[in-house]
Amino acid sequence: QVQLVESGGGLVQPGGSLRLSCAASGRGFDLNTMRWYRQAPGKERELVAAITSAFSANYADSVKGRFTISKDNGKKTVYLQMNSLEPEDTAIYYCNALNEITSFINWGQGTQVTVSS
């Protein structure tokens, strides 16, 4: 299992950038598909981006071309670089680890991102 702690959220103006980090502790980080979800007030939690153990990445249509997911196995950290932010990106962003062998899932506690002028 891995334990996850997100950081990097905050208030940013439309058009700005933020980089979220999700630091993992525990064993087996490199065996996980790492995912970023977000949940806006009154909305369902949605998958934003994912990166597999083989470094294959995919994105929600709403963030393609603006967000980039990456990870550093040596640092046990996954990142979400968010550019050209829009007010619609305002949400709590959660890190998620899906173990590709056991299918066990771990969640972080979330970090708030607010895009507003």
Image: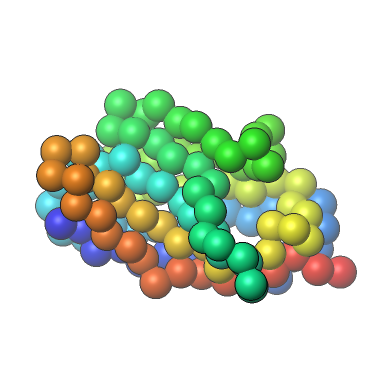
What kind of colouring is applied to the model shown?
Answer: rainbow
User: At which x and y percent is residue 115?
Assistant: 75, 65
Q: Tell whether 2 sits left or right of 35.
A: left
Tell me residue 17's x, y (percent): 70, 53
Q: Is residue 50 above or below residue 113?
A: above
Is residue 69 visible in this depiction of the protein? yes
Q: Position of residue 6 (x, y in %)?
A: 42, 64
* Number of numbered discs: 0
Residue at the spot 86% in from the left edge and 69% down from the top edge: 117
Decide: is 79 above or below 24.
Answer: above
Q: Nearer the viewer, residue 52 or 62?
A: 62
**Splitting the image into 4 quarters, where does residue 70 fall?**
top left
Q: Residue at x 78, y 61 (%)?
A: 87
Task: Look at 19% across and 45% down and name the residue there.
Answer: 103
Asked if residue 74 can be seen in this view, the reply is: no
Q: Is residue 19 left or right of residue 117?
A: left
Image position of 70 (left or right of 100) = right
Horizontal relation, residue 115 to residue 73: left or right: right
Residue reaching furthest to the right: 117
Q: Give the answer, above or below, for where 103 lies relative to 12.
A: above
Residue located at (34% from left, 34% from top)? 52
In which quadrant is the N terminus drawn?
A: bottom left
- Residue 14's x, y, as percent? 82, 58
